[in-house]
């Protein structure tokens, strides 16, 4: 979905055949490794999939004809949460980090993707016009970086309260 949404939102080129085939091949490899019960290989392939998607989006953003919707900034943050959740168990057994990785993968990825893509989809479905905060009057602006920080900090607090861990206390 992101390989079609990112180019449409930014006016960039669609995915090439090579990029599409690579995405399909990685997905097929992940299915094979999951079927064969190779969890480490599954995580490695999933990480490569996320990195390939991040690379794809970065390339499209560099060659964009227009800026994507303001909320699209949440999409790369969600992908980074997903990547962290995928690779953290490969490198540590620390329960604090594993708890945060689990919350990041299960909720951070989805929450940020829905927020980022919903910033375009919801107004379209509702047939409303949304003013881009970058072009709004100064008194009506909402600091997107603050919203982004609070949204993602809530995941850290959730992990803290849910699993009862405290940063060194």
Image (cartoon, rainbow, N blue to C red):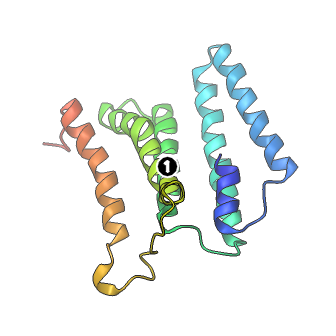
Task: Please tell me whether residue 86 is drawn above or below residue 29 in the rendered image.
Answer: below
Secondary structure type for disc 1 = helix
Left or right of 50, for residue 19 = right
Q: Quadrant of the N terminus?
A: top right
Query: Would you say 55 lies left or right of 158 here?
Result: right
Report which residue position mark 1 lands on: 113
Q: Residues within 10 Å of mark 1 (few under 14, many from 20)?
A: many
Establish if 31 lies above or below 97. Answer: above
- Residue name at image x 18 percent, y 43 percent: 168
Name the residue: 23% across, 45% down.
157
Q: Would you place residue 117 above or below residue 96 in this image?
A: below
Residue located farthest toward the right when viewing the structure as drawn: 17
Residue in the picture at 70% in, 52% down: 4
Give the left or right position of residue 39, taking residue 165 as reference: right
Q: In the rendered image of this protein, does residue 47 appear above or below residue 54?
A: above
- Residue found 87% across the figure and 48% down from its top: 17
Looking at the image, the residue that sits furthest to the left is 169
Q: How many marks?
A: 1
Residue 96 percent across, percent down from the top left: 29, 36
Asked whether 49 or 72 is in front, the reply is 72
């Amino acid at each position: 979905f992101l390989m079609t949404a990112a180019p449409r939102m930014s006016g960039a080129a669609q995915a090439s055949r090579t990029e599409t085939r690579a995405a399909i091949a990685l997905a097929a490899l992940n299915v094979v490794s999951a079927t064969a019960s190779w969890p480490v290989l599954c995580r490695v392939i999933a990480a490569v999939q996320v990195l390939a998607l991040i690379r794809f989006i970065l390339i499209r953003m560099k060659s964009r004809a227009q800026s994507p919707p303001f909320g699209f900034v949440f999409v790369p943050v969600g992908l980074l949460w997903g990547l962290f959740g995928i690779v953290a168990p490969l490198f540590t057994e620390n329960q604090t980090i594993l708890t945060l990785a689990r919350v990041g993968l299960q909720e951070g990825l989805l929450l940020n993707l829905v927020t980022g893509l919903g910033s375009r989809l919801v107004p379209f479905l509702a047939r409303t016009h949304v003013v881009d905060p970058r072009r709004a009057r100064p008194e009506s602006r909402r600091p997107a970086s603050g919203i982004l920080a609070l949204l993602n900090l809530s995941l850290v607090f959730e992990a803290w309260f849910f699993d009862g861990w405290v940063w060194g206390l």
